[in-house]
Image (cartoon, coloured by chain):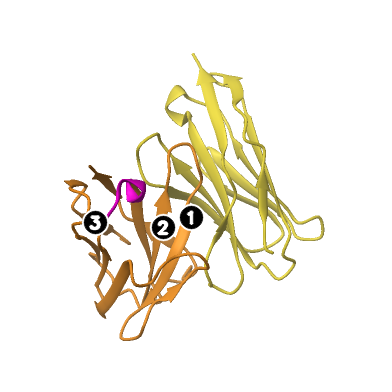
Chain colours: A yellow, B orange
Amino acid sequence: QKEVEQNSGPLSVPEGAIASLNCTYSDRGSQSFFWYRQYSGKSPELIMSIYSNGDKEDGRFTAQLNKASQYVSLLIRDSQPSDSATYLCAATEYGNKLVFGAGTILRVKS
Amino acid sequence: GAVVSQHPSWVICKSGTSVKIECRSLDFQATTMFWYRQFPKQSLMLMATSNEGSKATYEQGVEKDKFLINHASLTLSTLTVTSAHPEDSSFYICSARDPWRQSSYEQYFGPGTRLTVT
């Protein structure tokens, strides 16, 4: 069974710090990886996608992928209270259905 | 780009009635749409994959006769919850892929529909 594992948290960081969110996946056939942010009562919002080993940066967000270790991470620099949300990691094999992790709750304290 | 809408955003219905939820891709044509359900403090659960012009593929444990999915056009998929019961109360979310985007594996989510069955 294909699985994506995340620490449920909550992960608490002070405002301005770097938040580090981690995710592992079981299916070596997974090719595409995504980070979604979900605010309470809202639907998920895509914030990062990554397909190749290494780092991908977009503004304050950096996604890291290590296929050998089956590990994906998301770094949020200069964390803001508005970043407080649940972050969902997801993986897919060649565009088939997404397999979601249970999500990590992030709390940024001002 | 890649905007997905849902209607209604919330609905309250009586037990035994049916409810239809619409999912539209507003600025792209979606050959594939996905329907999810999310209970409070739980992650998303994929219910079915909807392909335009063909029957939906349901996940194990999802009753296809209860959750009817129709994907009649490249911009519209509908989910009908038939004979709804209180245990069907949940947050239903659709997503769509834009096959013409370079990052075509990305799924874009609609805002969700909160269903309450009394």
Q: Which mark is residue B113?
A: none
Q: Amino acid at mark 3?
A: Gln
Residue B59 vs B16, above or below: the answer is: below
Q: Amino acid at mark 2?
A: Tyr
Q: Quadrant of the N terminus of chain A?
A: bottom right
The residue stretch that appears in magenta: B84-89
Judged from the image, the secondary structure of the residue bearing numbered disc 3 is strand
Q: Residues within 10 Å of mark 3 (few under 14, many from 20)?
A: many
Chain under disc 1: B
Residue B19 vs B32, above or below: the answer is: above
Q: Which mark is residue B36?
A: 2
- Between A38 and A13, the residue placed more toward the observer is A38
The span from disc 1 to disc 3 (Cα, nearest Å) is 18 Å
Judged from the image, the secondary structure of the residue bearing numbered disc 2 is strand
Chain under disc 2: B
Q: Which residue is mark 3?
A: B6
Same chain, labels 1 and 2: yes
Question: Extreme top residue here?
Answer: A110
Residue B58 vs A23, above or below: the answer is: below
